[in-house]
Every structure is written in C-alpha cells, then in structure tokens.
Image (cartoon, helix red, strand yellow):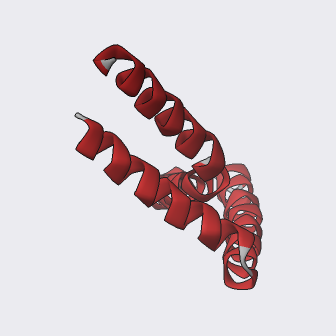
Amino acid sequence: MPKDIEKEIKKYTGLERLKNNKDGQILISYLKDGLITEIDTLLMEYRNGNINTLTPIIARIDERLAILRILTEAENNKEFWLDALEENKEREL
C-alpha cells in the first residue's frame, strides 16, 4: 500500500513541477487558448445548425479540460496522497 501511495506522490510531484515551470505555464496557456477557440467553434457550429460537427469538438474540449485539470490540480492531489501516506504510517504504529 505505501508503495502505491509513494508512486502517486511522485507522479503528482512531477506534474506540479511541470505546472510551475516556464514550459508548464506555456502549456497551460496553450490549453486555455485552445479551449476558448474550441468553445467558440462549438457555439458557431451550433448556431449554424451543424449538429453533426459538435461531437468531435466536444471531444477535443473534454480532452483539453482533462489535461488542464491534471496539471492545475496536481498540488491538491499530491497533498491528498501525502495525507494518505501519513495516515497509513500512523496506522502502522
């Protein structure tokens, strides 16, 4: 169990580092800009009655949101797993 927890901590620590460095900030900015563009496209296609084109646009929005959430929530997720590790250690005592 602690090995799994430590693996999660390591994963989210890396994601947190990425989020906080210059390249990560560029990536986050790119994702946000892409989301705005996709939402604009979605609304335009909806207004024009092009219902068949909405599914792939929504899929791209979902994908970008998922990546953005992973990066922006990395610190909270790391804290969650650090707390879980601490609780696990306390139970072992």
Q: Nearer the viewer, residue 1 or 37?
A: 1
Q: Nearer the viewer, residue 86 or 60?
A: 86
Q: Residue at x 73, y 53 (%)?
A: 43
Q: Residue at x 47, y 29 (%)?
A: 86
Q: Specify whether 50 is left or right of 37.
A: left
Residue 15: image quadrant is bottom right
Residue 31: image quadrant is bottom right
Q: Residue at x 42, y 33 (%)?
A: 85
Q: Residue furthest bottom?
A: 23
- Up-down relation of residue 4 to residue 42 (above or below): above
Q: Specify whether 57 is left or right of 9.
A: right
Residue 17, percent from left and from top:
62, 69
Residue 87, percent from left and from top:
44, 21
Quadrant the N terminus occupies = top left
Residue 5, percent from left and from top:
34, 41
Q: Residue at x 73, y 59 (%)?
A: 44
Q: Nearer the viewer, residue 16 or 60?
A: 16
Residue 35, percent from left and from top:
69, 62
Q: Nearer the viewer, residue 63 or 18?
A: 18
Quadrant the C terminus occupies = top left
- Up-down relation of residue 41 to residue 12 (above or below): below
- Up-down relation of residue 65 to residue 27 (above or below): above
Q: How many marks?
A: 0
Q: Specify whether 56 is left or right of 22.
A: left
